[in-house]
Amino acid sequence: MEIIDTLPSLGTLIAEIQADIGSNGDVYFIVASMAIMLTCHGVLVLMIAAAFHAIDRFLKRIPYLAGASFISYFIAILLIILTHLGEIVAWTYVLMRFNVFPSISQTFYFVGEMYTTLAFGSYTLGSNWQVLPILISFSGLFAVSLSGAALYSMMGSLLTRKSDLTGSSV
């Protein structure tokens, strides 16, 4: 019970974080950029999944092209990987706007490590930028979750197709 009594209130926590971040609008611009990137990522993944399912429905009508759906699945995987790389590049440009790091390559590596939540390197951030790893890693985790759900849906379609062709259930 003693530990709970020493915890700050939510208002105090938010006020201290706000004071640490600073009052400039840079962080808010980055949060808005994150929302835009996640929205674009979601739309792109939905488009890739919709295209895959449309191709799969077409290929289901042609029995001798059974393997073509697996090829389209691997193309979908490649496209989804490219959307993640594109998002890492977009994050790099956002951070370059604020000169968080002295070089493009250092910014790219930082973003890549945070987006994938590897956090392998050691980066020194000013107190007003310490929230960046949280924002970038949240963005990466959420984007990977969206991608995983879409890929799971596509794989389910392939497994259903296989059981339809063989007459067995999976």
Image (cartoon, rainbow, N blue to C red):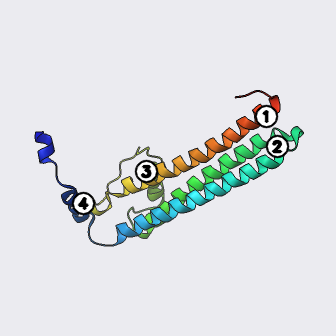
Query: Can you tell which of label 3 and label 2 is closer to the viewer?
Result: 2
The picture quadrant where one finds residue 32 is bottom left
Horizontal relation, residue 116 to residue 62: left or right: left
Instruction: Mark 3 or mark 2: name the one nearer the start of the chain.
Output: 2
Give the residue displayed 62% in from the left and 41% down from the top: 152
Q: Nearer the viewer, residue 97 or 82?
A: 82
Query: Looking at the picture, which amino acid does disc 1 mark?
Result: Asp
Contact between labelled residues 2 and 1, with CB atoms less than 8 Å apart: yes
Q: Which residue is mark 3?
A: 114
Q: Position of residue 160 (x, y in %)?
A: 73, 36
Instruction: Mark 1 or mark 2: name the one nearer the start of the chain.
Output: 2
Query: Quarter of the image containing the C terminus?
Result: top right
Instruction: Mark 3 or mark 4: name the one nearer the start of the chain.
Output: 4
Q: Which residue is mark 4?
A: 14
> Label 3 vs label 4: CA separation?
23 Å
Q: Is residue 52 visible?
A: yes
Q: Nearer the viewer, residue 101 or 57?
A: 57
Instruction: Mark 4 or mark 2: name the one nearer the start of the chain.
Output: 4
Which labelled disc corresponds to residue 60? 2
Q: Which residue is mark 1?
A: 164
Q: Position of residue 110 (x, y in %)?
A: 43, 53
Please give the count of numbered marks on the rendered protein: 4
Query: Can you tell which of label 1 and label 4 is closer to the viewer?
Result: 1
